[in-house]
Amino acid sequence: MYLGRIGCSRIPAVVWLIVLAVAVIGCPSKTIRYPAEHERLLRIDQAMESLRSAYQQKDRSGFQALLLPVDQLDELRRQADMDFAAFSAIALEFKIERVVIEKDDINVFINWQGTWKRDAADMGVRQRGYARLQWVGTHTILLRDAQGDLPFGMKTKQLLSEPPSSQTLPR
């Protein structure tokens, strides 16, 4: 290895490789600066995963346990129930884009994609979208509202996107 250009020709190349390795690897232990906030973020992430998993597994009670008992979520509950009845398999992925926390209010912005199949032979409906899930809580995290292009309610979206059946009228 030639190190003459940088003025280090007297230091063996092996020493430089060791210094470089230490610089790249760094110190493996990190101290969490704000442990309470870190724990809350972990609970938010767990709530998101629990919501996704309960929906994907068509677990009505698990899905509804993550929702606040407020009227504005009744439609979300109904849409999820329709999906559970209509599809035999649901595969859903969430990618968290951003989390905004203001006191007890938590806004989680997600990109999602999924596949909904009516039966094993079905190719399935593939969709993707962007939504904001509004959570509330510090120790117990519950969904308060959802806005945007949600993955819940694919049965209704599919019905709305299908062209009406053309019936020919007698002349």
Image: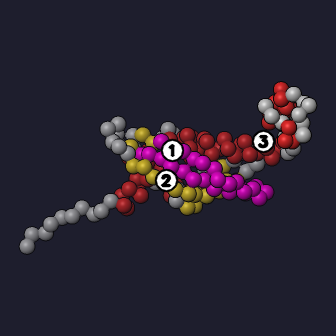
The overriding secondary structure of the stretch rendered in magenta is: strand
Q: Judge depth for marks 2 and 3 and give the one in front.
A: 2
In this figure, which residue is indicated by the disc labeled 2?
128
Q: Residues within 10 Å of mark 1 (few under 14, many from 20)?
A: some
The residues tagged by marks 1 and 3 sit, at their Cα atoms, a distance apart of 25 Å
Q: In screen coordinates, is 63 left or right of 10?
A: left
The residue lying at 60 percent from left, 48 percent from top is 95
Q: Amino acid at mark 1?
A: Leu
Q: Nearer the viewer, residue 159 or 28?
A: 28
Looking at the image, residue 18 lies above or below residue 52 = above
Q: Residues within 10 Å of mark 2 (few under 14, many from 20)?
A: some
Residue 85 visible, this angle:
no
Q: Amino acid at mark 3?
A: Glu
Sequence-wise first label, 1 or 2: 1
Q: In screen coordinates, is 103 left or right of 117?
A: right
- Asked whether residue 99 is drawn in magenta, I would say yes
Q: Judge depth for marks 1 and 2 and give the one in front.
A: 2
In this figure, which residue is indicated by the disc labeled 1?
92
Residue 96 visible, this angle:
yes
Q: In screen coordinates, is 92 left or right of 165?
A: right
Q: Nearer the viewer, residue 161 or 54?
A: 161
Instruction: Please report the bounds of the magenta region as a residue range.
Output: 91-116
Question: Which numbered marker is on residue 39?
Answer: 3
| Image location (x, y in percent) of residue 6 | 86, 42
